[in-house]
Image (cartoon, grey):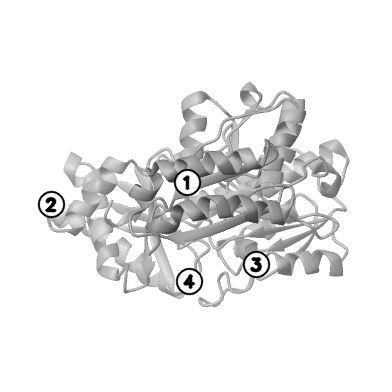
Amino acid sequence: MKYFGTDGFRGRANEGLNVEHAFQIGRFVGWYYGLRQDRKARIVLGKDTRRSSYMFESALVSGLVASGADAYMLHVIPTPGVSYVTADGSFDCGIMITASHNPYSDNGIKLVNRNGEKMDEDVLKQVERYIDGKIEVPLATGDKIGCTVDFMQGRNRYIAHLISSANFSLQGIRIGLDCANGAASSVAKPVFDALGADVYVFNNTPNGFNINVNCGSTHIEEMQSYVLRNHLDVGFAYDGDADRCLAVDDRGRVVDGDLILYVCARYLNKHGGLAKSTVVPTVMSNFGFFKALDEIGIKYEKTDVGDKHVYACMRKKGYSLGGEQSGHIIFGDIENSGDGIMTSLRIMEAIRAEKEPLSTLVRPVKLYPQLLINVPVTDRDAAMESPEVEAATIEAERFLEGNGRVLVRASGTESLVRVLAEAPTDELCRKADDIVLKALERFRV
C-alpha cells in the first residue's frame, strides 16, 4: 500500500497527510458507496482532539457531500466509537481522524467498513488509485449533492452502549482515569459516573496541542504516582483515540496488555465465557505470560504484531479474546476492535466478581525481562533469509535452555531487524541478543 498502512493514512499534518488528501478520500468514498450505485450514501465520521483534526474534518465532509453522500458528524469521539456507531446505525462506512498515540503534529485518517471493521484492502487500493489520478469520480449535482448532519446522538448511543455492557455497580470504588487530553476526555468519566464509581479524572482538558503530551498510556508513570498519591483502587490510562488502555493496580504497578489479557482470560474461562478456552496474543507477548497461561490450562494462538492480525485470527477461528502488550484488547463477543474504555470495564468486572484487588489478580504472572535491539540493515529481507541469522537464533534459544526465547523479525516500515530476547535476568537477555547480533553484523548499515 502506498498511503494506507496498518493504521490508516498517517503523516505529519499538511506534510505527509494534507487537506487535499482528505478531500480526495471524501470524494472517492462518497462516490463509491453512493453515486457509483445510484443511491445516497450515509457515512459517519469522528475525530480526536488535535488542532488539525478540525481541518481534516472539514475537508473530508466537503469531499463526501460533493460526491453526493450525507456526512454524519460525531465530532470528538474514540475510534471504537466510530466503529460501534457505523455498525449500530447501518452506515455504509465510517471515518476516524486520528494519529492515535502520536504527537499532536501528526494526524491520520482511518476507514472502517459497514461492520465497523478495518476497511477492506481492495477498497483502500482503489482510494489510492484515485489519489494518484488513475480513477475519475464525477461531482454530484442538483438534488444529488449530499448534506451534513450533526450526529451527537451517535456519541450518546456509544456511551449508553458502554454503560449497558456493565451489569455491575462500582459504588464506593475509587478509580483514576487519564484521558491523554484526547478522545476519551468527554466519554470515559460519564461512563464510570453512571456506574457509581468515585472517579478521579485528569488530563481531560484538550487544547489541540496537548494530546499524548506526558500523559496517557504512553506515559503511564503519571498514573502510577496519581494512584498512590490519591490512594485509589485502580487507574486506567488511554491513548489519544482511546482504542487502547493500560492499567495501574492498587500498589501503583503497571498492568500492561499481557497482564490484562491474563486477568480477563482467567475470569472468562472460569465462567465459561472464553471461547475454546483460547486467547489470541501476538508474538511479542511476554514469555512469562505464556507460562502463566500454561499453568491454568488456557490455550493461546500467536499472531503477527498488529491488532488487525489478532482480530483476523479471532474471527476466522471463533475465538473471543485477543490483544497486544500495548493495550489493544478485543472482546470478540461484544466488539470487533480494540476499545480502551470497554477494556477498563471488563477489568472492573473481573475485580468485582472475584472480590480481589487487581494486584492479586495479576500476581500469578511473572513477566520476564525483555531486551529489544533494533539493528539498521542494508537489506532486511536478505538478513531475515540468511542461514547464519537463522542458525544464530536457534543457538540463542538453545543457550536459554527453554527458560526464555529469542524473536527476530523485520520491521514492517523501516530497514531494521528487531532482535528481542526474554530471559529470567537482564544479563541472560543481553547474552542471547549478542549471539544473533554477531550474525547480523555483515548486514549492518
Question: Decide: marks 3, 4 in contact (CB < 8 A)?
Answer: no
Q: Nearer the viewer, residue 204 or 306?
A: 306
Question: Decide: marks 2, 4 in contact (CB < 8 A)?
Answer: no
Instruction: Say whether disc 1 or disc 2 marks the residue closer to the N-terminus.
Output: 1
Q: Nearer the viewer, residue 38 or 222?
A: 222
Check the picture and name the quadrant holding the C terminus: bottom left
Q: Which residue is mark 4?
A: 50
Q: Amino acid at mark 1?
A: Ser
| Mark 2 crowd level (few <14, some 14–19, many ≥20, 10 Å Cα) | few
**On screen, 69 above or below 16?**
above
Mark number for residue 135?
Answer: 2
Residue 242: x percent and y percent? 57, 57
Residue 431: x percent and y percent? 63, 53
Q: Which residue is mark 3?
A: 219
Instruction: Say whether disc 4 or disc 1 marks the residue closer to the N-terminus.
Output: 4
**On screen, 167 above or below 378?**
above
Question: Decide: marks 4, 1 in contact (CB < 8 A)?
Answer: no
| Mark 3 crowd level (few <14, some 14–19, many ≥20, 10 Å Cα) | some
Instruction: Say whether disc 2 or disc 4 marks the residue closer to the N-terminus.
Output: 4
Mark number for residue 415?
Answer: none
How far apart marks 1 and 2 lie (CA) works out to 28 Å
- Under circle 3, the secondary element is helix
- Under circle 1, the secondary element is helix
Q: Amino acid at mark 2?
A: Ile
- Mark 3 vs mark 2: give the one in front: 3
Query: Residue at horizontal 32%, vertical 67%?
Result: 17
Q: Which residue is mark 1?
A: 83
Q: Amino acid at mark 3?
A: His
Query: Residue at horizontal 16%, vertical 55%?
Result: 140
Instruction: Say whether disc 3 or disc 2 marks the residue closer to the N-terminus.
Output: 2
Query: Residue at horizontal 57%, vertical 69%?
Result: 212
How far apart marks 3 and 4 lie (CA) works out to 18 Å
